[in-house]
Amino acid sequence: MKALVSVRNLTRIFDVSKPWLNRMIERKPKAMLTAVSDVSFDIPEREVYALVGESGSGKSTIGKMVVGLLTPSEGTVEIAGVDLARETDADKIETVRSDIQMIFQDPFASLNPRWKVRDIIAEPVAARGGDTAGLSEKLLEQVGLAAEDAGKFPHEFSGGQRQRICIARALASEPKLIVCDEPTSALDVSVQAQVLNLMSDLKDEFGLTYLFISHDLTVVRHMADKIGVLYLGRLVEEADPTTLFERPAHPYSQMLLAAAPKMDGFGREVVPPKGEIPDPINPPPGCAFNPRCPLAIPLCRQERPELRDVDGARVACHRAEEALARGRDANDA
Amino acid sequence: MSEPVLSVRNLVVEIPTRTGVLRPVDKVSYDISAGEILGVVGESGAGKSMTGNAVIGLLDPPARISGGEILLKGQRIDNLGREDLRKLRGKEIGMVFQDPLTSLNPLLRIGDQLTETMLAHLDITQDEARGRAIAALDEVGIPAAASRIDSYPHEFSGGMRQRVVIALALCAEPSLIIADEPTTALDVSVQAQIIALLKRLCRDRGTAVMLVTHDMGVIAEACDRVAVMYAGRLAELGTVRDVVQRPRHPYTDGLMGSTPLASRGQRRLRQIPGSMPRLGKLPDGCAFHPRCPKAEARCRAEPGPTLEADHGRAACWFPVEAAEVVS
């Protein structure tokens, strides 16, 4: 199947230095924060690719680069064969842009409180001079709200309903790709279920492709066709949900899965994970996970592992085979 | 069974407004024994935080306790004056809030914040207090506690800050800790560390813990018993195992079914239609009936049976039988 989104060696570095004068007085060097480091993946058409990771893992930064809100420092994002950051043909850029939409985490902050819902939803089409007659009403019904709601303001809706309005707005320009950045994190469980079901239905109905960004492993497992696990801006493992959840091959994925609360974990005594995510300004040499990794060997401190195929997954770990064997032993025990 | 540390009996909290009196907490009763973790779970607006705030006397006016009793170790605390309540907070009841940054004073070293609390409540000297503060930081797992005691809150990461807040809640050796969404702002791996810490402290010290959260996974993992709240009322109360595996209230059943955790492998999540009613617009009868698949005439006419603290599971006229649970 053809890849709709193709991300190659994507890197984003932020300059987080203090102002020039402070640096001169304190004699401090520039501080560079590598938010995303050499990430490559493909999203085939009509699939859901999920990026999962803890805070600071760079998942939202990748999302922003995919939609073009940030330019990559290095590497490329190609959507339907067009690299938005380098393409010079304005028509081509415009066509591709209208194929991309985004749904944000906070449905309270992402809707203009002074606009009526009708105008909010029609905006992506109106901005390109399209025909918006009856569009908002039709979309509202598709996302499970009433056509009369078009005349209301955002404050008249609950969190779940607002997220439905955000989804309706994202659908307005008939996009192919929707980047969803933590779309249900601000919602209650029962409302989350409604929104996730709606997103699955719409995907089937309109043939959408999702880049689904979340920190919630259970949501990701439910939604994704393929999952990329991020750690400190690096893709450490990529696999389909069954493979990842049943036999995670990277020690970080293993740690993350073991730490996630389970519904049948009554009185479970977990050995809590050691340590915390290191400072992204001075990441550890070699594999970024080596200070917390139970399997680390000297090689892990010297050489950054490349993604390679291990047992049905792509894993960036020198010791993936040992990690897999260890995971099997833990399951047997 | 020994006397519970905290007994809440028919607690009613009311907020008078221009359009009428709202009841964010309505006839809620439960007990927490020493060394027990009671989970209070519900969606936003269910009244779970309000219950915790009522216990510790931190209701924002005009909200007030208008009925029922709160007993701490057999003593009524709901009718205490401000000064008595102030002495109680920190001494007998510790509090851990969701956001560790806003619950610490950014301008004071954490050591000063810890010793201040201890000096206010315990009869000890400054030096003893400092020694105990280091011991408390050590106990909650802050590495090199003796040197980090003079750091400011901003010098700690989120997870470490939450540990400091827990040390602060613990330092006067309270018999009850109210933890309001203590892990919601934290990452999964840090959340696991904090939950393990709370469980260990609860077991070692015999502290009673009231854990308010919306995360069923956290509840299943950490708690002994769980109280499910819906629209200000207790919907179900029971041991974690019973409530999670054999929910009896249709709301609990729906809540369990709609977590992606439970419906693993299914293409669609089970969903509860609609959303929780606003407090000003509660339907007649059982507050859940408009969303309930089993609602009958009686549910529309009269509110569900009120749960007593020690018996009864679900506040429902037609509780789900074991065989009906789909998941």
Image (cartoon, rainbow, N blue to C red):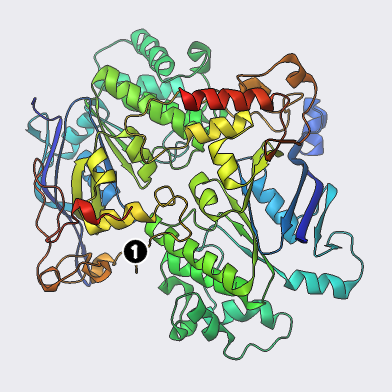
**Image height of B325 relative to B137, above or below:** below
Q: Chain of mark 1?
A: B
Q: Nearer the viewer, residue B49 or A195?
A: A195
Q: In the displayed structure, does residue B43 sit left or right of residue B308?
A: right
Q: Nearer the viewer, residue A201 or B49?
A: A201
Examine the image and state in which quarter residue A157 appears: bottom left
- Considering the numbered disc 1 on the image, is that residue within a helix, a strand or a loop? loop
Place of residue B132 in the rendered image (x, y in percent of width and height, measured from the top left): 36, 12
Q: Is residue B215 at all visible to an observer of this figure?
A: yes
Place of residue B217 in the rendered image (x, y in percent of width and height, measured from the top left): 38, 41
Q: Nearer the viewer, residue A160 or B86?
A: A160
**Looking at the rendering, in which quadrant would you find the N terminus of chain A?**
bottom right
Place of residue A67 in the rendered image (x, y in percent of width and height, measured from the top left): 73, 61
Q: Nearer the viewer, residue B251 or A116?
A: B251
Identify the residue at the far bottom of this view: A133
Identify the residue at the far right of this view: A88
Q: Is residue B109 at all visible to an observer of this figure?
A: no
Q: How many marks?
A: 1
Amino acid beneath label 1: Ile
* Crowdedness near tag 1: few (<14), some (14–19) or many (≥20) residues, C-alpha within 10 Å: many
**Image height of A216 relative to A45, above or below:** above
Q: Residue at x 35, y 54 (%)?
A: B257
**Looking at the rendering, in which quadrant would you find the C terminus of chain A?**
top left
**Image height of B160 relative to A204, above or below:** above
Place of residue A168 in the rendered image (x, y in percent of width and height, measured from the top left): 56, 74
Query: Which residue carries the number 1 mark?
Result: B272
Examine the image and state in which quarter residue A283 appears: top right
